[in-house]
Image (spheres, helix red, strand yellow):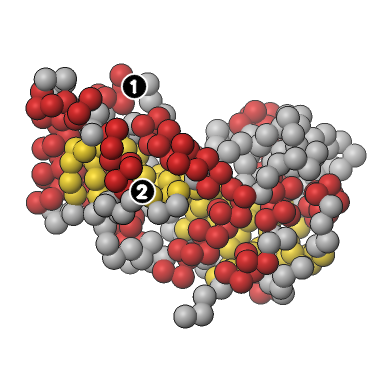
C-alpha cells in the first residue's frame, strides 16, 4: 500500500539551540521524504547556517505558502519569517530575539494547521528562559498550543517502539499527584485516552492502568488508593464501554505493554511513565499532544545549549518525531472528539 505523503510543518525551534541543526540532519534522511512532505517554518539565514555547520548538501527553497513547495529530497522547503539578526545571534546563549522567533515559528505553524494547509506539526526544542526574555507569556509548547487553539487540558501521550503511555497527572509533586487520583479523574481520563487513540486511527484500544503502590496495594495492605479510587474509576470506565484493565502493578505493566499485551498504559504520575519510556529507548521516545485540532508530535529533549552550533547533536529523535507524525497523519481524524 502506497504511503500517503501528508504535509508536516516543522517549526525550527530556538535559533540558538540545536533545533535548526537536528532539523537539517533529519531532512537529509530520504526516508522522511518517502513518508511525508516536510515544511520548515523558520529563518532562512539561520537554517542555511545550520546546513553549513552540519556539513551536508541540502538546498533551501524559500516559499511563502505550502502550495509553493517542491517536497523533493535534497531540497528543503522553508517559510522564511526573517526574524533573526545574524550579527547578534550567539549559539548556546539565552536571547530575547530567539525566544520571540521560536514563538513566531510555532504560531505560524499552528495557523497553517488551523487553516488546513498542513496536517500535522513536528516540533523542535524551545527554551523557557529565552521565551521569558522575549516577554512571551508561555513556558513551553503545551501552554502555547492550548492558547493558540483554545484547547483545554490537552492530553500527553508518549510513544516508544510499540508502547504508548498516557499520563493521569504530569507536573505535580507526588503528594499533589496522589490527591488527583480520584475515581472521577480515572474514569474521565480513560474515556479521553480511548478517544485520543480513536483519533490516531487505532482499532485496538486495550488500556492498562498502572498501579500506584507496590503490587497495586495488595488489596489494601500497602495503601488504599487502588481500592478506594483507582479500581472504582476503572470499573466506571468499563461501564462506559472502555476496554480497560487494572490497576496492574507498575513494575510489570510497561513490560507487558511493550510486548503487545496492552495497546496503551495510563501512567498515574509523571516519572512513572517517563522512566519507563526513556529506559526503553531514550532517543526514540516521542511525545504526542492529543486533543488539539491537528496532530502534534515532539522530540522529548531540550535545546542543548551546551552543544548548539557544534555539529554534535544527533538527529535520531527528530527523525522519529517527523516519522511518527507522518505515520499517524493520514489516519488522524477530528470527528471522534467532542
Relative to 61, say whether 262 is above or below: above
The residue at the point 33 percent across, 66 percent down is 335
- The numbered dot on residue 174 is 1
Left or right of 206 on screen, residue 288: right
The residue at the point 62 percent across, 50 percent down is 316
Nearer the observer, 210 or 328: 210
The residue at the point 33 percent across, 41 percent down is 254
Tell which circle, 1 or 2, labels the residue nearer the N-terminal end.
1
Nearer the observer, 41 or 150: 41
Q: Quadrant of residue 69?
A: bottom right
| Mark 2 secondary-structure assignment | helix
Residue furthest to the bottom:
1
In percent of width and height, residue 233 lies at: 15, 39
- The numbered dot on residue 38 is none
Nearer the observer, 39 or 106: 39
Q: Which residue is mark 2?
A: 258
Separation of marks 1 and 2 at Cα, in angstroms: 25 Å
Relative to 182, say whether 141 is above or below: below
Amino acid at each position: 500500500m502506497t504511503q500517503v505523503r501528508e504535509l508536516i510543518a516543522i517549526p525550527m525551534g530556538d535559533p540558538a539551540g540545536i533545533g535548526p541543526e537536528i532539523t537539517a540532519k533529519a531532512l537529509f534522511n530520504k526516508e522522511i521524504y518517502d513518508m511525508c512532505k516536510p515544511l520548515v517554518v523558520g529563518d532562512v539565514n539561520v537554517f542555511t547556517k545550520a546546513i553549513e555547520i552540519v556539513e551536508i548538501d541540502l538546498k533551501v527553497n524559500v516559499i511563502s505558502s505550502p502550495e509553493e513547495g517542491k517536497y523533493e529530497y535534497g531540497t528543503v522547503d522553508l517559510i522564511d519569517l526573517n526574524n533573526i539578526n545574524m550579527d547578534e545571534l550567539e549559539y548556546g546563549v539565552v536571547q530575547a530575539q530567539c525566544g520571540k522567533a521560536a514563538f513566531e515559528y510555532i504560531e505560524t505553524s499552528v495557523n497553517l494547521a488551523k487553516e488546513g494547509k498542513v496536517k500535522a506539526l513536528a516540533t523542535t526544542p524551545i527554551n523557557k528562559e529565552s521565551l521569558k526574555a522575549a516577554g512571551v507569556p508561555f513556558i513551553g509548547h503545551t501552554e502555547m498550543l492550548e492558547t493558540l487553539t483554545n484547547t483545554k487540558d490537552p492530553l500527553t501521550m508518549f510513544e516508544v517502539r510499540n508502547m504508548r503511555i498516557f499520563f493521569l497527572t504530569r507536573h505535580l509533586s507526588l503528594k499533589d499527584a496522589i490527591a488527583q487520583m480520584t475515581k472521577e479523574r480515572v474514569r474521565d481520563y480513560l474515556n479521553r485516552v480511548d478517544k485520543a487513540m480513536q483519533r490516531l486511527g487505532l482499532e485496538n484500544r486495550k488500556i492498562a492502568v498502572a498501579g500506584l503502590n507496590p503490587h497495586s496495594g495488595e488489596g489494601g495492605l500497602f495503601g488504599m488508593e487502588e481500592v478506594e479510587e483507582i479500581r472504582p474509576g476503572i470499573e466506571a470506565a468499563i461501564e462506559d464501554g472502555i476496554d480497560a484493565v487494572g490497576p496492574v502493578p507498575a513494575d510489570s505493566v510497561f513490560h507487558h505493554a511493550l510486548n503487545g499485551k496492552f495497546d496503551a498504559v495510563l501512567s498515574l504520575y509523571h516519572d512513572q511513565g517517563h522512566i519507563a519510556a526513556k529506559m526503553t529507548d531514550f532517543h526514540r521516545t516521542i511525545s504526542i499532544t492529543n486533543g488539539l485540532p491537528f496532530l502534534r508530535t515532539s522530540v522529548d529533549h531540550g535545546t542543548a545549549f551546551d552543544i548548539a552550533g557544534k555539529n554534535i547533536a544527533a538527529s535520531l529523535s527528530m527523525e522519529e518525531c517527523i516519522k511518527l507524525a507522518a505515520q499517524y497523519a493520514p489516519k488522524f481524524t477530528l470527528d471522534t472528539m467532542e
